[in-house]
Image: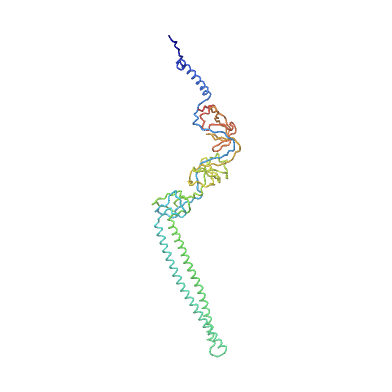
Amino acid sequence: MDKKREVTKPVWWRNPKTLIITLAVGLSVTFYFISQKYTSADMQVNSDHLIYSTVKQGPMTISVSGNGILVPDNIQWLAARVSGRVEQVIVKAGTQVNRGDVIAILSNPELQQQSEELRWEYEAMLAQIEALNVELESSVLQQQALVLKAQFAFQSANLQLTAEKQLIENDTGIVSQINYQKTQMNVSQLKQTWQIQQQLANKFALNMAAKVKAKNAELNKLAKILQRSEERIASLTIKAPMNGIVQESDLKPGQQVAIGGLVAKIADPKSLFAELQLSELNIGEVSIGQTAEIDTRNGLVAGEVVRIDPNVINGNVQVDVKILQVLPKSARPDLSITGKINTSELQNTLYVQRPAFVRSNANTSLYRLDQQGYAHKVVVQLGKGSVSQIQVLSGLKAGDEIVLSDTTNWQVHTTILLN
């Protein structure tokens, strides 16, 4: 008995004709939707290469920034007080020193010889003054002896005159009138001699004091010359006058240093302040007393504006900022820094992170994102600008997301596809 065979229909994707038709329809639909999406954008940009920011509302701090360096307020330049040859360099640039530490040692044989000769001359002068004092004391004693001798002669003659006077008054006839008058004349002469000797003694004492004073003046003058010479010898050993860091020192052994030549520059690291260079376009917003923030690359410290230079150099104005906090241990003189000065505060305003190449108080074109992956060109009115933020006056609202990256090459396009 014959059985009836059942015919199995082939699966549609195994049918070449059906498969080709299906794929063609699918590709047509896909191409249609893609073309619809891409033809609505003027150009396409890789979104991974872009930076975005969201518009916010709230308080905004207006600030200006600039680069600068840390500068010590207390600096001492060491200059050679005497000429000499460098024998030894003890301390080099960058070394921390304390007051009195030896930095370098110089030598000057001629100066040392002069000092020795002055020392010998000073000692010879001392010996001369000592001999003069002995001589003057001897002369004083001799003068005093002459005064005493004249005094005794006068007193003896005066006693004789008194006795002869009594004899004359008693009319004894022992003393003649002539002898009595001679005695009177002798007493008068001896009295004058005694007075003259006293005056000579006083004048001699004054003369002696004048000579001693003159010699002492010469000795003092020589002592000061010797002292200066010894100070110059001591100056051959160059010492730090303060605690600090040696910033500059180009001394080398064997080098000849002239008087007044620069030996070293020492700065006190505890007296550092910031010197910022701000653009002359922003300096009008800066005033003394405003707060600042200094970035030392190893930390942020607060500061205060204390001086604004009246001069403009190469388009910049120097602003000095006093450091109000302890600096990091790595802070040193001439360290490169950046600073931000807070000039004002805006309350409850729209603001956004500052896009590239936009100016404050100007209208500009920015690209605002939508939820479909497009960026649309919109005109935005900007207000006051800060270092990293800028005020939005119109054209955007809180929550809008914009492209921060440079869009200069996009400006001819109104819609950008971000893929």
Q: Nearer the viewer, residue 110 or 266?
A: 266
Q: On the rendered structure, is 221 left or right of 382?
A: left
Q: Nearer the viewer, residue 68 or 403?
A: 403
Report how many numbered discs are placed on residues in the image. Answer: 0
**Snapshot colouring:** rainbow
Q: Position of residue 51 (x, y in %)?
A: 51, 33
Residue extending furthest toward the bottom: 172
Q: Position of residue 216 (x, y in %)?
A: 47, 66
Q: Quadrant of residue 231?
A: bottom left
If the image is split into quadrants, where does the N terminus sit?
A: top left
Residue extending furthest toward the right: 348
Identify whether 357 is placed above or below 249.
above
Q: Position of residue 403 (x, y in %)?
A: 53, 31
Residue extending furthest toward the top: 1
Residue extending furthest toward the left: 254
Identify whether 22 is placed above or below 255.
above
Q: On the rendered structure, is 214 left or right of 166?
A: left
Identify whether 327 is placed above or below 156.
above
Q: Position of residue 274 (x, y in %)?
A: 52, 45
Identify whether 158 is placed above or below 244.
below
Q: Nearer the viewer, residue 323 or 226?
A: 323
